[in-house]
Amino acid sequence: MPSRYYVTTPIYYVNAPPHLGTAYTTILADVLRRFRALCGDESRMLTGTDEHGAKLEAKAAEHGMTPIDFVNKMSAPFRAAWPQLNIEPDDFIRTTEPRHIKVVQDLWQKVEKNGGLYLGHYEDWYCIGCESFKTEKELLPGNLCPVHQTAATKLKEETYFFRLSDWEKPLLKFYEKNPNFIAPESRRNEVISFVEGGLKDLSVSRTSLTWGIPVPGNPRHVMYVWFDALTNYISALGPDGANANDLRRFWPPSSRAVHLVGKDILRFHAIYWPAFLLAAGYREDELPSQIFAHGFLTVDGEKMSKSLRNGVDPLRIATELGADVLRYYLLRAISCGQDGDFDHAALIERYNADLGKNLGNLLSRVLGLCTKMTAGKTPEVGTLTELEQSLIDTMSASARKAAAAFDEIAPHRALEAIWDVSFAANQYVDRAAPWAEAKAGRVDRVETILATLLEALRHLSVMMWPVMPKKSDEMRLQLGLSAVSPRIGDDQWPSAFEPRAGGEPLAPSGPLFPTLDKDAVHALLEKLVPQVPEAPAANTSDPVQPAQSAEKAAEITYDDFTKIDLRVGIVKTAEKVPKKDKLLRLTVDLGEAEPRQIIAGLALSFAPDALVGQRVLVVSNLAPRDFGKGLVSHGMLLATGPSDALSLASAPDNAPAGARLK
Ligand code: MSP
């Protein structure tokens, strides 16, 4: 009997298009699905969109659209995006679909029948951004939500309460019995201490809102969006109760079901969701197998801003560099489960180093040697020496380690283990020196060395497939192999050294990852690094061009340095620039007849008044820069940090305006 594996992503709110954060989870789910399929499991991946609730009702109104028209329009780009990232979900669920609504109402009725709901009044706070109830204690001064920094709304309405408090003890026991239910461990501990702090009953319906699933028997109420949304994980599997349907096949205990979520929505999944299911009559062995929370991504060291998402468009990166390269970078560079940074410069560095110089070069080198030494055909393996044995040992250790790491949802470690083979094979070519053996006329040795290398490449092509399916196909084409094609019940994960028979054709066709030279890197960064039009391109430390800051600037001579006229300035006036939320218009005294006008991208970090009277450091001989409508900047202030937390470089208190820095 093959095992079954069910992996899900959160369903995404359609208030904004897909971004790097949502792409990350969806790629991760696809990689895990592919890995389990490769090992012979019957696997299934689900993603989709979350389309009800106060946030979307408000967004639709902002756009002058009905909620349904709005969500129809906004859901489509999600469905279209994933294949462009080589993601192949088995299903895509929308919470406005009848198949979902039916199952949610059914779950509600089961909870109600079991006495899990009661009618009451809710009077407290609600953050529309989180779609979550908040207590006064959880809010910042001014009733701001600490996550969204926007004002929470005071609600006072009739509501159905879910008896969440009943599940406090059973959940704690369940977590104890099932230590892997919440991962990573640090997150598990957070959830446990939260539950230990006490669970209050949860408001699960709204009367002040119409955009939701009607409560059966009381349509004045619509369901709380999280009751609705969480149910997608089972509604996509079909109605309960039917024989041999997907719900029975892909839901525990017949299947291993893993929900991937961001750390911000762990509580909903690790507390509410199992409590809803238990209250509806599901047994403990019918709860999801694991809730895995990944961390948050920053971009080039900066928080992804809600409105701009730092302009990083995963689809654009996929177009420029290939979806597999983005997939590799995200999974290799970020320790899954931890917060991580998406750094454009590091992306290109890894492209050139790990992919181009290491793996790509190995392929070209081995195929090149085969063209010369075995007439472009697979060689026949002969007697193995210690040299080969050592590479074979690396191959089997790598396969073991990588498989374990994928299963632990640690793709960064899996890729590290896979690349061990590439490193070892590159070293092996040099040590085994087939060219020297050829010169000495030892044809058997030449063939054995090249056969061993081709087998290492075959292993690599299989193990990389979950992360880089297209590149694996390309590589296998060159190796004269058919594309990886998982089959249920057939474990194809490499486990043995099985070089092919000799005499089969190889088909080299150029580099797998053509190296990007300095100019190409520069051009690519220009295209990829987000440019925010209203921010000055080179003002302050320029938070919108951070990738360049990761690279060392080219060396300059002392003469070059002296061309920069750095002066102490004193800010005389400061005001916001209308309609440009990042810009301030300053006048700065540089010891000249008149203070100069400088336009600076400081508005997210400083109130204008706070700057007046400050001593600042100014690049005073920068060519004037026109921001349009008479807004010309005559200089640049020095500063460092992300655009919403900049620190200004400062001058000593007694330095006069206009003093030159040297
Ligand atoms: N609709 C809910 C989920 C319901 S699941 C039953 C939701 N949607 S969301 O669109 O706001 O967020 C979806 C996911 O994106 C969350 O897992 C969230 O953690 C993730 N991310 C949003 N910004 C992110 C980063 N900057 N980095 C990584 N993931 C991030 O919540």
Image: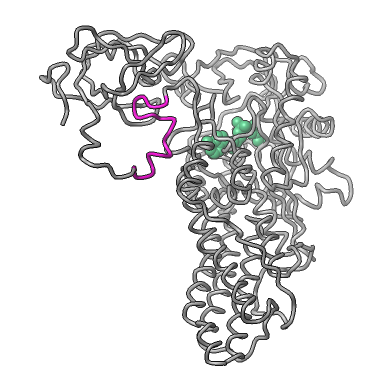
Task: Tell me the quadrant of the picture where the C terminus can be found.
Answer: top left
Q: Is residue 573 above or below residue 339?
A: above
- Left or right: residue 207 versus residue 444 is right
Name which residue lies at 20% across and 15% down: 590
Residue 143 to residue 33: above or below: above
Quarter of the rendering containing residue 224: top right
Q: Nearer the viewer, residue 37 or 251?
A: 37
The quadrant of the rendered image in which ligand 1 is seen is top right
Frontmost residue, 489 versus 583 = 583
Q: Position of residue 485 (x, y in %)?
A: 76, 62
Residue 580 versus residue 197 in the image, above or below? above
In this picture, residue 88 sits left or right of residue 311: right
Please provide percent x and percent y for residue 504: 74, 78
Q: Nearer the viewer, residue 511 or 222?
A: 511
Magenta stretch secondary structure, dominant: loop
Name the quarter where the N terminus is drawn.
Answer: bottom right
Q: Is residue 356 magenta-colored? A: no
* Residue 605 image point, x, y percent: 36, 21
